[in-house]
């Protein structure tokens, strides 16, 4: 191209989009701030943000969207999440090697969750559905709906951390889909009664996928794409820089966009949204994500480095 300035203008959107975005931390109060809550999933139920702990006993948490918007508008300085009764119908005792709930999504008054289990170096995912009793302010999981999902590879603590609603289907995505450790990545598509289970190919993706937003009108959704350097030997990622020591390995905290085209999930050409890494060098294990209108995303960590709810604005 003969016009360098024009070339720069054409590339400018990609350059801007690839820059790291500074997350805005949202100050929470109450029991949810205890790292032992290990928040593992986010979802919208009507205009309430639902926070799912990995090991809920008798409650999970919600925040009205208005309070989040007030915080971001600087008209609120802290948020105390509300409690919602949680009735697991004893699934934590029924599932051998139960390791907690990993994701949650709502479809009208129905709720779907994924569950992780591991025993004797064998792991499985599970999916279950339940209902929301608005009168009792309670979520009740139907134990008879429980269905096991076989993992494509045996990687410790790696199962199905992502769940989506697509029209009349419920989709779950396995956590690790990189070519070196998962030769044939797939996702599972269930009907809403969790009776049928169809496996479809998923695009090769480095690092872990830990949650996804809802699907928009263009059948697009975003996922959290996360890498903790401690998983280097387990995940065998292709890094784009040389390393000589463990300390050279850098965490990855970013968002990727996917789309469902002709019934198959593909990666879009949209550039990743890189989240600016912590100045203290801590790797933040982002476990949940939702869209916040057309403003950006809300993301949450588990216990590392603690319960952190943050807003990631869309790049300008």
Image (tube, rainbow, N blue to C red):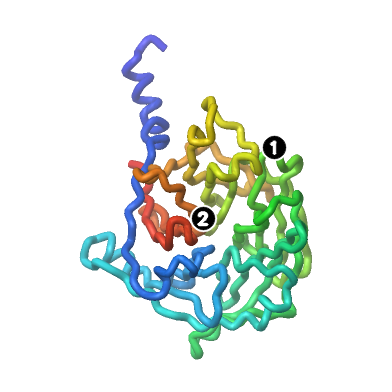
Q: Quadrant of the N terminus?
A: top left
Disc 2 residue crowd, few under 14, some 14–19, many 20+, Cα 10 Å: few
- Residue 153: x and y, percent? 75, 49
Instruction: Indicate left or right for 221 with 124 as reference.
Output: left
Give the mark toward the camera: 2 or 1.
Answer: 1
Q: Is residue 25 above or below residue 46?
A: above
Q: Give coordinates of residue 290: x percent, y percent.
A: 47, 59
N-terminal label among 2 and 1: 1
Q: Nearer the viewer, residue 213 or 117?
A: 117
Q: Position of residue 41 (x, y in %)?
A: 53, 63
Residue on which the image places disc 1: 179
Question: Mark 1 and mark 2 in contact (Cβ < 8 Å)?
Answer: no
Residue 267 falls in image quadrant: top right
Image height of 148 relative to 224, above or below:
below
- Please state if 212 lies on the left or on the right of 97 as rendered: left
Q: How many marks?
A: 2
Give the residue displayed 49% in from the left and 85% down from the top.
137
Which residue is the extreme one toward the bottom? 135
Residue closest to the eye, 82 or 155: 155
Outermost residue on the left side: it is: 75
Structural crowding at the residue carrying mark 1, measured as other residues with C-alpha within 10 Å and reported as few (<14), some (14–19) or many (≥20): some
Residue at image position (60%, 62%) is 165
Marks 2/1: CA distance? 28 Å
Q: Is residue 25 above or below residue 252?
A: below
Tell me which residue sits at (49%, 69%) in the image.
Answer: 37
Residue tagged 2: 216
In percent of width and height, residue 254 lies at: 47, 44
Asked which quadrant contains residue 98, the reply is bottom right
Instruction: Name the secondary structure under disc 2.
Output: loop
């Amino acid at each position: 191209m003969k016009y360098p300035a024009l070339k720069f203008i054409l590339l400018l959107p990609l350059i801007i989009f690839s820059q790291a975005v500074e997350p805005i931390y949202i100050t929470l109060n109450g029991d949810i701030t205890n790292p032992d809550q290990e928040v593992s999933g986010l979802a919208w139920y009507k205009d309430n943000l639902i926070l799912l702990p990995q090991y809920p006993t008798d409650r999970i948490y919600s925040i009205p969207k208005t309070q989040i918007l007030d915080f971001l508008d600087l008209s609120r300085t802290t948020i105390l999440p509300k409690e919602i009764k949680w009735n697991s119908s004893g699934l934590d005792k029924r599932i051998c090697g139960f390791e907690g709930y990993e994701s949650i999504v709502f479809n009208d008054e129905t709720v779907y969750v994924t569950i992780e289990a591991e025993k004797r170096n064998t792991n499985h995912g599970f999916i279950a559905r339940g209902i929301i009793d608005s009168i009792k302010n309670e979520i009740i999981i139907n134990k008879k709906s429980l269905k096991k999902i076989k993992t494509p590879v045996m990687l410790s603590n790696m199962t199905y951390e992502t769940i989506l609603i697509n029209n009349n289907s419920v989709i779950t995505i396995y956590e690790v889909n990189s070519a070196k450790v998962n030769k044939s990545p797939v996702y599972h598509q269930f009907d809403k009664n969790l009776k049928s289970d169809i496996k479809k190919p998923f695009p090769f993706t480095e690092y872990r996928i830990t949650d996804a937003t809802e699907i928009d009108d263009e059948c697009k959704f975003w996922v959290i794409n996360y890498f903790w350097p401690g998983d280097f030997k387990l995940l065998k990622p292709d890094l784009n820089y040389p390393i000589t020591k463990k300390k050279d390995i850098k965490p990855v905290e970013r968002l990727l966009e996917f789309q469902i085209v002709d019934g198959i999930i593909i990666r879009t050409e949209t550039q990743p949204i890189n989240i600016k890494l912590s100045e203290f060098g801590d790797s933040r294990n982002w476990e949940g994500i939702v869209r916040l209108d057309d403003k950006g995303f809300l993301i949450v960590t588990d216990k590392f480095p603690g319960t952190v709810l943050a807003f990631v604005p869309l790049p300008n």
